[in-house]
């Protein structure tokens, strides 16, 4: 009876991941910054809606501007990662990133539209 030839260690185990991860998502300073911006802007928008009586429109515009910038960053990051995934023939990941990036882009457009309209209404 013959035993199968031994495989090199690199073929048996996946390479060790470097850095910190939260599930499949690598924790980088950019990810932390975008997450803080999203949570902070949503908290600011909720504060303005429920607590502020005067000057509410420009404050909402500022909150939605930061929220739009955060989602635009997610859309651009998804585009870059989609390109990398497609170049490595990982079509499922590329498709998922295209959907996530598209939705993030639409949310960013909506936030920027609200910011522009609230600025126009406030100045008129």
Image (spheres, rainbow, N blue to C red):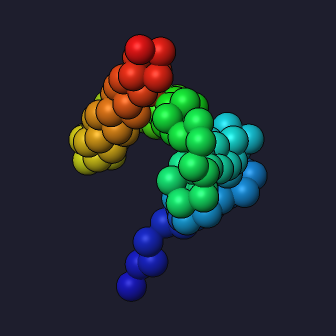
Is 48 above or below relative to 81? below
* Residue drawn at (57%, 49%) of the image: 53
Percent coordinates x, y for residue 91 in the rendering: 25, 40
* Residue drawn at (49%, 66%) of the image: 5
Percent coordinates x, y for residue 108 in the rendering: 39, 32
Is 25 above or below relative to 37? below
* Residue drawn at (29%, 46%) of the image: 96
Of residues 81 and 4, which is closer to you in this image? 81
Image quarter of the C terminus: top left
Percent coordinates x, y for residue 80 in the rendering: 45, 26
* Residue drawn at (33%, 44%) of the image: 100
**In the image: residue 47, left or right of residue 61:** right
Percent coordinates x, y for residue 61 in the rendering: 50, 31
Of residues 66 and 27, which is closer to you in this image? 66
Is 95 above or below relative to 68? below
Q: Residue 13 occupies which quadrant of the picture?
A: bottom right
Is 8 above or below relative to 122? below
């Amino acid at each position: 009876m013959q035993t199968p030839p031994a495989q090199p260690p690199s073929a048996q185990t996946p390479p060790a991941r470097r850095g910190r991860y939260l599930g499949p998502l690598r924790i980088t300073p950019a990810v932390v910054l975008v997450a803080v911006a999203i949570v902070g802007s949503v908290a600011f928008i909720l504060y303005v809606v429920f607590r502020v009586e005067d000057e509410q429109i420009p404050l909402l515009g500022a909150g939605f501007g930061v929220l739009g910038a955060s989602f635009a960053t997610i859309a651009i990051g998804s585009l870059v990662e989609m390109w990398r995934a497609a170049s490595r023939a990982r079509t499922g990941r590329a498709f998922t990133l295209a959907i996530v990036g598209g939705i993030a882009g639409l949310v960013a457009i909506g936030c920027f539209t609200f910011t522009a309209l609230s600025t126009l209404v406030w100045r008129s």
